[in-house]
Amino acid sequence: MSDYALELGFRLLLLISLAEAWNLLAGYGGLVSLGTASFFGVGAYALVGLANQLGVPPALAVPVAGLAAAALAALMSRPLFRLRGLYFTVGTLALAEALRLFMINNTAFGGATGLFLAGDAPSLQSLFLMALALLAVTTLVMALATRSRFSILLRAVRDDEDAAAQIGVRAFRIKLLALVVASWLTGMAGALQALKLGAVEPYGTFGVQWTVAVLSIVVIGGQGLRAGPVLGAVFLVALSELLADWPALHLALNGLILIVVIRFAPQGLAGLPSALAQRRGRR
Amino acid sequence: MTSPVGQPLLEAAGLVKRYGGVVATDEVSLQVQRGEVLGIIGPNGAGKSTLIGLLGGALKADAGTVQFDGADVTQLPAAERARRGIGRTYQIPRPFLGMTVRENLLAARYSLHPFARKADALAACDAVLARTGLADAADLPARTLPLLRRKRLEVARALALDPKLLLLDEVGAGLVDAEVTELITLIRSLRGQVQGIVIIEHVLRVVRECCERLLVINFGRQFAEGRTGDVLASDDVAAVYLGTAGASGSPPQREVAAPMPVAAQALAPALAPLLELKGVHAGYGQARVLEGIDLAVLPGQTVAVLGTNGAGKTTLAQVLSGAIRPSVGQILIDGQAVTGWPPHRIAALGLAQCMEGRRIFAPLSVEENLQLAARRVPPAELAERLERVYTLFPDLKQRRRNAGTSMSGGQQQMLAIGRALMARPRLIVFDEISLGLAPVVMDRLYEALAALKRAGMTMLVVEQDVERALNIADQVHVMEHGRIALSGNAAAVRDDPRLRHLYIGKAD
């Protein structure tokens, strides 16, 4: 494959994995998070630490770095789950911003300039393969999480947490499991991105752009639908490639599409066929 | 700890729940023996649902203890109490809307037995669904179920837990006689399976035929307790709760039934109908609900629409408001076709809706809810309209600054009626206003309707309660399977044997 195809493929695979993880939380769990960047960033920084300080090889460092993000999720679960609905969303956004500011001001992790990865970066080919492996793991996890008994409990909590408690569902555990798993996947994606760039710095890795990209992908693709993240990611990556020469127009068009989708196809692209079928049935 | 046979299944002592300064539950104690069905009755707002919340664990008591099956569960959250065998239903159903009906039950099975065999879990769910009459809906999304089937789902979901104690919060509201009979049969059949049942209910037949003991709650306190027959016969209970419904035999003819002013009645046939439906068909998607409805309401007339659940009454009300567009047929207001008009334009012609389920705006105060219906009215006129509503319902004036949904069910219904009046409509459609209300509250609402009628208001009353509707109506239509099966003036319909047949069906 050409470098361009590998480059594009890597981005697409990474975004799909991130979007799948976010869809698990928001689409299936009702936990609309704006904290993707915090887990992504922790994964990225953990990878650099593991590689530079301990010399862990990349293939092992990526999943372990994901665990660092999962640990952060477990640590933050108690305060975050005290908040519900929109308050949870704002809480996760606050977490991401707080971590970003901490990283800028804390010199131990390189401050505003960040850290460089020692040693050679892996080839584009092997990065692509690692991203493919990440997507495989993500797909497996999502298949388990969305077709299993766990998914029934998770959706019950999403639809009505109090009513779920009345039938014996321990909502906290269910949400914790979803958050930890999603954060692990998000952290691994962050680690891969750090591996590819060969450097981490707070503005890029903890930046809100990752959160926004993931959110747009799932909303445009279709929340709570299995095909949503893939469709959304392909659509958005294709759009950004087509409009690569006109960045301002790209941003504006992105926003416009988001508005149109939310207004006219709240189930996203993946929900269009059933929405159209329903409309036809009504006539 | 083993549970001795003589020990009660549930024992609550000195339960207190305060919301700010308001004491919703004040030192309530109760016991449920093994094998017993306890009924809790009381006016709307007496604190019955709060009590269920305290027993089920959804609410935390400010004082008092709850012992269940030999253990103190006072400090346990709802999920843990559910796992120990307390199943509850919500008065306003809260199904998991994005899941199928079967998945709603599976959530209960899997939360308790995460590693059970899938076939066993499915079999258990399907057995409960068959028992509660939901077998045909197992694969439908819960969102598509209408209100009364959602109530069944509440019961089914609680049963999927295999509870020892079942807390039923007004599951009989809105059912017609045949369905009430079904419910009673179901509750009785549960006795072998569930060790104890607590029922909160306004449908007195359920209370009378299922409960051994009754607890009457008023203003959050225990008002009376005793054997069902004794409690229902008590004069004190009649005064706070039962109203006219407690009187044995048929309810007395109230002043409500007073005829319209003679002049209006004589004029009526000559007047053009205010509202007219011609051959209206309507439905949802593939499902056709109304199949050719003809109906006319003359100025000053009160028309009642009766019928069993599923006959299409609420769909009819929605067609009138413009929320559902008829597929065939015409709706005329003052002879002008308004078919397919959006709801706000129909409202502007003077048609007000008092919708099923009240639909109070929760974030707004009582007064704001009322003002909303009369937005472009000059302040002086607005004040006068408010005053009229407050005269009709003094309860609302007292609570004008409270949040609309903080009031009891009866007061919320008053607010819904008041809101419909604020637009100074020429015709009001009342959809099931008596649903889920204490008998004494229903009396008050129907007295208010009678007062409106005397003042010359034109009304279309869609109602479940046959007796109350017949008392107030001039003209009555009885619906069956989306058609009007029987029409006539109230007296003629009352005496028509077909009424009993249509309504009660093959229940007896």
Image: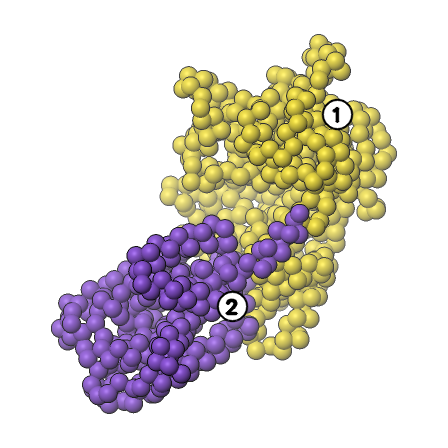
Chain colours: A purple, B yellow
User: Can you say whether B228 is above or below B499 in the image?
Assistant: below
User: Can you say whether A204 is above or below A261 in the image?
Assistant: below
Q: Position of residue B137 (x, y in %)?
A: 68, 58
Q: Amino acid at mark 2?
A: Ala
Q: Which mark is residue A227?
A: 2
> How dense is the environment of label 1, judged by Cα within 10 Å: few (below 14), some, or many (20 and up)?
many
User: Can you say whether B243 is above or below B88 in the image?
Assistant: above
Q: Nearer the viewer, mark 1 or mark 2?
A: 2
Does B243 sit left or right of A154 as displayed?
Answer: right
Does A188 sit left or right of B494 as displayed?
Answer: left
Q: B47 or A170, which lies in front?
A: A170
> How dense is the environment of label 2, judged by Cα within 10 Å: few (below 14), some, or many (20 and up)?
some
Q: Position of residue A244 (x, y in %)?
A: 33, 64
Task: Name the quadrant containing residue A77.
Answer: bottom left
User: Can you say whether B261 is above or below A202 in the image?
Assistant: above
Which residue is denoted by mark 1 in the rendering? B475
Q: B148 or B285, which lies in front?
A: B285
Q: Which mark is residue A207?
A: none
Instruction: Tell me the element at label 1.
Output: strand
Q: Residue at x 61, y 41 (%)?
A: B436
Does B482 sit left or right of A44 as displayed?
Answer: right
Q: Position of residue B227 (x, y in %)?
A: 66, 47
Does any portion of residue A14 appear in the rendered image?
A: no
Q: Amino acid at mark 1?
A: Gln
Subunit ID for the residue under disc 1? B
Instruction: Tell me the element at label 2.
Output: loop
- Answer whether labels 1 and 2 touch (C-beta < 8 Å): no
Q: Residue at x 30, y 60 (%)?
A: A247
Marks 1, 2 in one chain: no
Q: Position of residue A87 (x, y in %)?
A: 35, 55
